[in-house]
Each structure stands twice: as C-alpha cells, then as structure tokens.
Image (cartoon, rainbow, N blue to C red):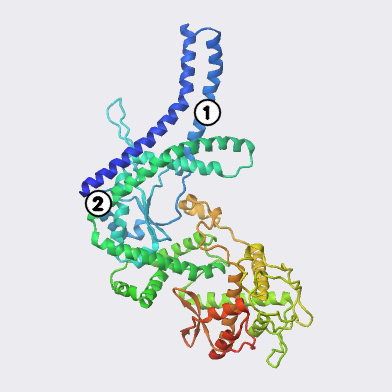
C-alpha cells in the first residue's frame, strides 16, 4: 500500500507539473503568434501571393506589431529568468563542519531510495524544509547540471537537476536526540525524490521565476520609463502566476503526499515521539525569544547561545510541568548537536541570524551590537535594563515638575527614590493637588503640566506631548489620570530616544563579498519577522515602574538580578524569585492604590525613600 501511495502522489504531482508547463508553452505560443502571421504575410511577397493593397496594409501593421510583441516577450522572459527568487536566510553548514550530520542524512536518503540533499543549512526557527537554490540568476549552472552528447551529429540534451538544500531548524539540533532528528527529517528528505523529476523541477523554476518577477516589478522606481515597462511585465507575470497557482499548489501537495508515504517505513514509531518534541521545542523557542532574547536585543546585546538556552528552558519546563516529567529522561541520550564539529560556533552564528531576523541589526558584533553570554546576562542585561528604565522614568518626572512629598523621610539630596514615583501616582507629591477619587477614568487625561518646577534642581528637558496619543486612548482607559499622563510621556520620550539613536547599517561592508549567501536576501527589509508589535504606553509604564522597584530592591535590600529561562528577567531575593510583583504594580497603575505594593516592599525590607543608583 505504501508503494501505491507513493506512486499515486508522484503521478499527481507530475500531472500538475505538466499543466504548469503547458501554461508556459501557451504563453510562448501567444507571444510567437503575431510573428508567425507576419512571416506568412512577408513570405507572400516574393511568391506573388497575398498581393494587393489590403495585404500590404496588413503587412505594414502586423510586422511592427510582431516585433513589439517579440521584444516585450523577450523582456518578460529576461526578467523572469534573471529575477532572484526569495531565499531563506540560513547558516550554511559545510560538510567539514558536520561530517556525522551529512553521513546521517545520506544514510537516510539511501534508506528512502531518493537523492541526497546537495547541502545542509540551519535556520533559527522550529521548522525544516527543502529549498532549491539553483536559479540561473545566481550564476552559471552547477557542476551537477550537464549535457550528455550521443552520436556524431545528434545531441541528446539531458538535464540533471541539482538536489535541493536541506534546511534544518537549529533548535531541533540542540533539543532533539539523534534518533528523533532522523525521524523528523525523514519526510523532508523524502521530498528530494519528486524534486529530481525533470518536469517537476522545470515547473518549480517557472513558478519561482514568475514570483520573483512580480517582486522585482513591485519595487518602487523613480524613472517613469522603467516604471511603465516594469508595470507591463508585472501585469503579465501576475496573469501567468494566477493561472499556475492552483496547479502549482496541487503539485506541491502531491509531492508532500508522496514524500510522507515514502517516509512511513523509516522510524515510524519514533516519529510520533519526535513530533511531540517538535511542539515542545517550538513552545520553548518562542518563550525564549520573546521573554529572554528580546529585552537584550532592544538594548543592543544579543545572546550568543540561544539554542543552548532552548535546552535550559525546556529542562526548566519539564521540572515545573507535571505533563513534561518524562522529557528530562531523554537528556541522557546523545543530542543531535553532537553531529556538529563545533556546536558553539554554529550556535553563535544561528543566534546572530535570529537577532537580525526577529529584531534587526548589523551582520557582526560592534560597540552597539555585542554578544552576551548566559552567565553575564543578569548583570549585563537585566541590571542595566532596569537602571536605564528607572533613569528614563525620573527624567520624565523631572520634565513634569514632580517634586518629592514633604516629610521626615524625604531625601534631602534630591536623589531619585522610589517614594517619589509612588507619591506622584497616588497624588501625594508636591507637584500639585491630589486627584479626586483616584479611581479609574474613562479616558486618558493629559493636564497642562509643563516643565520642571522651581527648586527641583532639574532642567526642564525636551518638550513632551501633554496628552496620550490617540492610539493609546483605549489602552489607557482603565488607568488613573496620573498614570495615563505619565505613560503618555514615557511613550513619547522613548520614541524620541529611538528616533535620535543612530541605527547601524544592517550589513557589514564586506559581508556580501565574504559570504555569497548574504546576497540571497535583502538586509534592508530587516527585521523580516518581528516578534512583537510596539509596546503600548500602559505596558511601558508597568515596565518602568517594575524596573524602579527592582532597582530599589537591589540597592536597599540586597536583592540581585536573575534570569528565568521561561519568564526572562527576574528579581531574586535571598536567591528566590519574586513572582508576585506584577499584580501590585498593576493595582497602582489602574487604581492609584499603592497599599499592596508598599506592604510588599515592607515585607522584603525594601526602603522606597532611599536613593537608588541609575544608569
């Protein structure tokens, strides 16, 4: 039954490929039809046929039209052939760097009776696929594409397509065991069989060329002539692409079905377990990127061992979650990253690529874009992030003219304190009368609060908007007026800083020359896959207030910054996490009630009236 299923899927893919090639032939026939008619009319002149004023007029009209159609067809064919299809940004793995991995993939291809992939690359994502990188625009045909010449005067041209590149998700190599990785890759490697068929390979090249031509013609152009020409080329490419879309999708569906059926005989029982590991790795990878890596990226640091962090995160998950108790026992087996000669170097390259894809940034380390090791993460990222946010919060308070509330606990040095923030949000500060009610408001209110007041010792600072932006009105609708105004000004201050900060060039000057693969994708579109939308003003206020509390805890109660593999930056008091801080912060922002937070501070021995050190 498996053999019949493979043959049925392959036959369906081949039949759809023939339909795509038939569409290509019809397009060529339509382009040649005016030229054929013009040739017939011109051939009638020496023979004496098709003579007369009407035929002469037809020749004068059709011949230039045929030439124009031929020129247009040649231009379209040139754009389709020369357009560069979209290529996935990957980390290339040479065979010398991973001989065991290449050997495993080749053995797997032999078991499946399919051609082995031509190369292996890693992607910083939880997915694996085959990618054809033999488009003509990338250079001369590879050595595997050649012509066999038979006979003295006859040439039988046979083209042997190059096997596609196997792209493997880098988190799989670190979390999965060798047997699990082989089971997961079996259906993917099996796809090289249909890819070797000439009709399927030709149909794929045609569709990829059309897709790339549409992308080229959609790029903005300043020259009106080139805009007009490319608009016509793009229209034709879109028409052809629409005609091929359904058949190309059915072709790929048939290829996938044939590959899945062929892989049924290889590690079928293990594949079920491996698929569970795929879902687990994806969940851990997502949390590691959004909770741990993103805070570092935002401040110009990129964790250099993200894949090793996946193992730590999932091991921590297995310790916390009773549903994942059996996963930790796998760690005694050989990990798939042992198939690499230098796992650390590969992990660092994949980590840098992940930072560029999901956040943007230059292609190499620099003064504003440097790697950070996991052991240095608490001090280099967490502590610095909290102090930078706390400093920004106090700059905004200075711009608002907020002064500490008078009392015996007020710092006489004018140094920044947590009490200043708490008093302002609860209406006890000296910047004006307390807000009546202190409850939630229906809309953010921005009063006419201006620069620094007298006696604060702070400069007025840059002008900030007096009200929350319109996009943040709904987000700030459940907060007090003071919280809403402070959140709006924090958002404006952060936007001003990001606008004023110089952004380094995404690509190093010699990156393309040193690595030909760097030319396969456009760095100007970074980040390609942003992890999160811009933070709202409400989230920014919560982050800054949490940072100020953590700074006070570190400076007055001996707390330390820490790293939680699943939740990111965390505050450690006596070596233990403090996960109950967020509800207290939200109560202050939403209701203006600082009692829960003050009680929490008192229980841990944190003194809000003491000065804190800012960045």
In the image, 19 versus 185, the foreground residue is 19
Vertical order, 449 against 150 (above or below):
below
In the image, 105 versus 312, the foreground residue is 312
Q: Residues within 10 Å of mark 1 (few under 14, many from 20)?
A: few
Task: Please name the residue shown 28% across and 57% down the image.
Answer: 103
Instruction: In the displayed orientation, state which residue is furthest to the left.
Output: 1
Quadrant of the rendering where the C terminus is positioned? bottom right
Residue 426 seen in the figure: yes
Quarter-of-image position of residue 384: bottom right
Residue 174: x and y in percent read 36, 67
Q: What secondary structure is found at the residue carrying circle 1?
A: helix
Residue 141 seen in the figure: no
Q: What secondary structure is found at the residue carrying circle 2?
A: helix
Left or right: 143, with 497 as reference point: left
Quarter-of-image position of residue 540: bottom right
Left or right: 538, with 335 as reference point: right
Q: Residues within 10 Å of mark 2 (few under 14, many from 20)?
A: many
Residue 400: x and y in percent read 73, 75
Vertical order, 163 against 597 (above or below):
above
Task: Please name the residue shown 42% across and 66% down the image.
Answer: 285
Residue 112 marker? 2
Residue that carries the numbered disc 1 in the rendered image: 71
For marks 1 and 2, the one nearer the N-term is 1
Residue 166: x and y in percent read 36, 53
In the image, 26 versus 525, the foreground residue is 26
Q: How many marks?
A: 2
């Amino acid at each position: 039954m498996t053999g019949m299923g493979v043959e049925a899927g392959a036959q369906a893919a081949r039949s759809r490929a023939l339909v795509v090639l038939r569409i290509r032939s019809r397009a060529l026939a339509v382009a040649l039809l005016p030229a054929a008619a013009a040739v017939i009319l011109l051939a009638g002149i020496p023979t004496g046929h098709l003579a007369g004023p009407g035929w002469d007029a037809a020749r004068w009209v059709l011949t230039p039209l045929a030439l124009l159609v031929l020129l247009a067809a040649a231009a379209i064919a040139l754009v389709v052939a020369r357009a560069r299809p979209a290529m996935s940004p990957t980390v290339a793995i040479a065979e010398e760097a991973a001989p065991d991995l290449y050997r495993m993939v080749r053995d797997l291809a032999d078991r499946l009776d399919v051609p082995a992939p031509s190369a292996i690359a890693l992607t910083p994502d939880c997915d694996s696929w085959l990618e054809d990188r033999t488009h003509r625009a990338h250079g001369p045909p590879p050595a595997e594409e050649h012509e066999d010449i038979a006979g003295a005067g006859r040439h039988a041209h046979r083209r042997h397509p190059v096997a596609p590149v196997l792209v493997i998700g880098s988190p799989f190599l670190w979390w999965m065991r060798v047997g699990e990785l082989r089971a997961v890759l079996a259906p993917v490697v099996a796809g090289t069989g249909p890819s070797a068929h000439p009709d399927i390979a030709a149909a794929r090249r045609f569709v990829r060329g059309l897709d790339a031509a549409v992308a080229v013609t959609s790029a903005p152009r300043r020259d009106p002539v080139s805009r007009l020409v490319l608009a016509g080329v793009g229209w034709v490419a879109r028409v052809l692409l629409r005609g091929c879309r359904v058949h190309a999708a059915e072709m790929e569906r048939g290829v996938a079905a044939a590959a899945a059926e062929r892989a049924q005989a290889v590690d079928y029982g293990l594949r079920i377990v491996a698929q569970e590991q795929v879902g687990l790795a994806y969940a851990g990878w997502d949390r590691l990127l959004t909770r741990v890596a993103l805070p570092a990226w935002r401040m110009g640091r990129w964790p250099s061992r993200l894949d090793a962090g996946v193992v730590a995160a999932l091991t921590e998950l297995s310790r916390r979650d009773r549903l994942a108790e059996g996963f930790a026992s796998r760690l005694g087996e050989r990990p798939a990253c042992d198939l690499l000669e230098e796992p650390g170097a590969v992990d660092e390259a994949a980590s840098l690529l992940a930072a560029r894809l999901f956040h943007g940034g230059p292609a190499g380390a620099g003064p504003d874009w440097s790697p950070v090791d996991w052991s240095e993460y608490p001090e280099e990222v967490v502590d610095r992030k909290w102090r930078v946010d706390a400093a920004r919060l106090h700059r905004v308070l200075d711009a608002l003219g907020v002064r500490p509330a008078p009392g015996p606990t007020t710092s006489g040095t004018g140094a920044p304190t947590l009490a200043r923030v708490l008093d302002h949000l609860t209406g006890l500060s000296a910047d004006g009368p307390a807000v009546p009610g202190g409850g939630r408001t229906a809309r953010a209110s921005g009063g006419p609060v201006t620069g620094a007041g007298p006696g604060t010792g702070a400069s007025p600072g840059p002008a900030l908007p007096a009200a929350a932006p319109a996009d943040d009105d709904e987000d700030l609708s459940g907060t007090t007026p003071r919280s809403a105004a402070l959140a709006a000004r924090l958002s404006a201050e952060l936007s001003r800083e990001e606008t004023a900060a110089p952004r380094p060039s995404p690509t190093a000057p010699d990156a393309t020359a040193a690595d030909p693969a760097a030319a396969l994708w456009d760095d100007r579109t970074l980040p390609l896959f942003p992890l999160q939308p811009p933070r709202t003003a409400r989230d920014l206020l919560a982050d800054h207030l949490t940072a100020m509390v953590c700074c006070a805890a570190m400076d007055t109660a001996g707390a330390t910054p820490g790293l939680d593999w699943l939740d990111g930056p965390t505050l450690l008091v006596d070596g233990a996490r403090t996960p109950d801080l967020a509800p207290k912060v939200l109560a202050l922002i939403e209701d203006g009630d600082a009692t829960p937070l003050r009680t929490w501070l008192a229980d841990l021995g944190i003194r809000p009236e003491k000065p804190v050190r800012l960045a």
